Amino acid sequence: AQSVTQLDSQVPVFEEAPVELRCNYSSSVSVYLFWYVQYPNQGLQLLLKYLSGSTLVKGINGFEAEFNKSQTSFHLRKPSVHISDTAEYFCAVSDLTGGFKTIFGAGTRLFVKA
Amino acid sequence: DAGVTQSPTHLIKTRGQQVTLRCSPKSGHDTVSWYQQALGQGPQFIFQYYEEEERQRGNFPDRFSGHQFPNYSSELNVNALLLGDSALYLCASSSLGTTQETQYFGPGTRLLVL
């Protein structure tokens, strides 16, 4: 079975500052890794995904994440945030044999201040 | 191309009632997954349908059931509603035949049980 831990429930940051949202996972098998964003009263939008290959993954809206197999981490980063990045961010995993069953973390609320 | 659509957007029910939520997948997708997202939490996997059969199931009681139609659309049924069933219900579609493991989420149905 897999599990996902998002280490920060809330991350306040000033506009134009860099940000890192931390995610650790556990699994006994190889996994796919994802970051989703959820704006208020909306569904989930895929930011980026790691399936295989390069461990640095670039996504939409200037976000990127790095897969670290030895530390079982998949932290999300952005070099300069905007007010519009204020949202809930979810890290998720799915195993290679489980189809699309996806396990989500509890979420990190990113709050960008002016 | 319409993405994943869900209906209704909001629903209010009382304890003990039954509810049916509907989902139309993105064009070209044949797999539908349902998730429950309680307030302040990450989505939790309920079950997944492919070829009109339940393919995987999460840790939810039998009160939660579903169906997939030949056109790949899906319904989620919840019987004997409890207050704790109040949540945002998300539908996600994907194509089982691809290797990219990408799910597309709908906007969700917000269910309130009084």
Image (cartoon, rainbow, N blue to C red):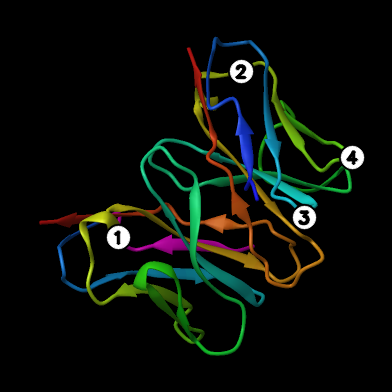
Contact between labelled residues 2 and 1, with CB atoms less than 8 Å apart: no
Mark 4 Cα within 10 Å, few/some/many (few <14, many 20+)? Answer: few
Horizontal side, residue B19 vs residue B65: left or right? left
Q: Secondary structure at mark 4?
A: loop
Q: Secondary structure at mark 1?
A: loop
Q: Secondary structure at mark 3?
A: loop
Which span of residues is magenta-colored? Answer: A1-10
Mark 3 Cα within 10 Å, few/some/many (few <14, many 20+)? Answer: few
Residue B67, given in percent of the width and then of the height, sits at 81, 34
| Mark 1 vs mark 3: in front | 3
Q: Disc 2 designates what residue? A: B81
User: Which residue appears farthest toward the left when viewing the image?
Assistant: A114
Could you tell which of marks 4 and 2 lies nearer the N-terminus? 4
Q: Disc 4 designates what residue? A: B70
Compute the Cα span from label 4 to label 2: 28 Å
Q: Residue at x 51, y 84 (%)?
A: A69
User: Which residue appears farthest toward the front when viewing the image?
Assistant: B1
Q: Quadrant of residue B24?
A: top right
Compute the Cα span from label 1 to label 3: 37 Å
Q: Nearer the viewer, residue B106 or B34?
A: B106
Amino acid residing under circle 4 = Pro
Q: Secondary structure at mark 2?
A: loop
Q: Is residue A68 magenta?
A: no
Q: Residue at x 58, y 43 (%)?
A: B106
Q: Which mark is residue B28?
A: 3
Could you tell which of marks 3 and 2 lies nearer the N-terminus? 3
Q: Quadrant of residue A58?
A: bottom left
Compute the Cα span from label 3 to label 2: 33 Å
